[in-house]
Amino acid sequence: MRPRRWIALAAVAAVAACGGEPPRAPGALRQESQGSGAVELTGAGSTFMYPLFARWFAAYAEHHPVRVNYQSIGSGGGIRQFLEGTVDFGATDVPLSDAERARAPGALVLPVVAGSVAITYNLPQIKAPLRLDGPTLAAIFLGVIRRWDDPRLRALNPGLALPARDILVVHRTDGSGTTAVFTAYLSQQSPEWRQRVGQGTSVRWPVGLGAKGNEGVTNGVRQTEGAVGYVEQIYARQNRLPMAEIRNRAGEFVAPSREAVEAALATVDVPANGDLRLSLLDRPGQGVYPIAAFTFLLARQHMDDCRKAKALVEVFLWALTDGDALARELGYAPLGPALDRAVQARLRSITCGPQRQPTLSTR
């Protein structure tokens, strides 16, 4: 069994209070006890969400007797542990499939925030942002484009002196929602990618070196000149790595940012059927960043333990309201009024205990 790295959220809270950033190499989060009466929640999943969860859970713990043990193990691991019933909640960047939902009757799949997958690279001689489109990006990760001075890259970047050096692709090795989002985008953009590789939390990569977590890909790119990889944008920002501008459906080259994700969110309607397994990929409109995604909370419609159920509901209701400012500060995009109301209503519908009473009516 590999050792787990526990990060005390009390320390994270102190950093946050001074305007600092969350840790760059998380393994798991654990809040210090608020006393013997504290409720403990366990969760696992998305590394995409780790920086925001660190801030949310630390800020909430300052005023509420709730501690959260969250393992940042990737969306695939979070889905697995949620379906196995070993955690109170999961977090994933790819929603449960119909088959997975059938294994967990009463599972709630609720978007809680949106973010972007950045294409980051290590070309120190390039000062202006690299520009890419979907087909060219797919060709790089297929190994069809192998050098930075390839004519297709030069055509997209006429003002840049691209170096005559090999491209090193860095990709995820763990089951990853970030990978699912990125490969779904490439499958939309490239028939060859769709046929040869496809999409999913884990795929058979044609080329490149593997790394674990957003942290591992970030470190691989940062340490290797000529490398390119895909990470949640806050990891690139924290490590001062450049991020490519990606051509959207309107023909604009757009960098990953909160504003560009909010532009994508503005195109999404709440479905009448109540199914909130929504996609932000390649949305139409001006100013939209095309590789955007929701992160989803995995919860249960009914929980046996009313103290845990109430703590879970109240933590995430707080996150969706008071926690919005922290999300914006880190570059994530809150859901927007209509979707936010729909998610809050689903959270408030969670029941608990043998009487299946409304969770928020319990003490």
Image (spheres, helix red, strand yellow):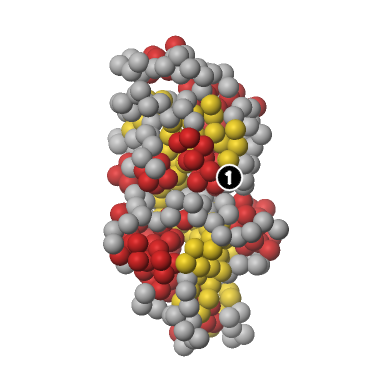
Task: Report the amino acid beneath label 1.
Answer: Lys
Q: Is residue 300 visible?
A: no
Q: Residue at x 39, y 14 (%)?
A: 155
| 339 up-or-down from 178: above or below | below
Give the quadrant of the N terminus: bottom right
Q: Is residue 82 visible?
A: yes
Q: Position of residue 177 (x, y in %)?
A: 55, 47
| 142 up-or-down from 354: above or below | above
Q: Which quadrant of the view contains residue 280?
A: top left
Circle 1 sits on which residue?
Answer: 212
Q: Tell which of 328 and 184 is nearer to you.
A: 328
Q: Residue at x 49, y 40 (%)?
A: 219
Secondary element at tag 1: loop
Q: Tell which of 138 and 355 is nearer to you.
A: 138
Q: Position of residue 353 (x, y in %)?
A: 59, 83
Q: Residue at x 36, y 77 (%)?
A: 63
Q: Which quadrant of the view contains residue 23?
A: bottom left
| 194 up-or-down from 106: above or below | above
Q: Position of residue 319 (x, y in %)?
A: 38, 65
Q: Residue at x 38, y 37 (%)?
A: 241
Q: In the orientation shown, which residue stands out farthest toward the right?
A: 1
Number of disc labels: 1
What is the crowding at mark 1: few (fewer than 14 residues within 10 Å), some, or many (at least 20)? Answer: some
Q: In the orientation shown, which residue stands out farthest toward the top?
A: 151
Q: Tell which of 287 and 130 is nearer to you.
A: 130
Q: Position of residue 347 (x, y in %)?
A: 46, 69
Q: Which quadrant of the view contains residue 52?
A: bottom left
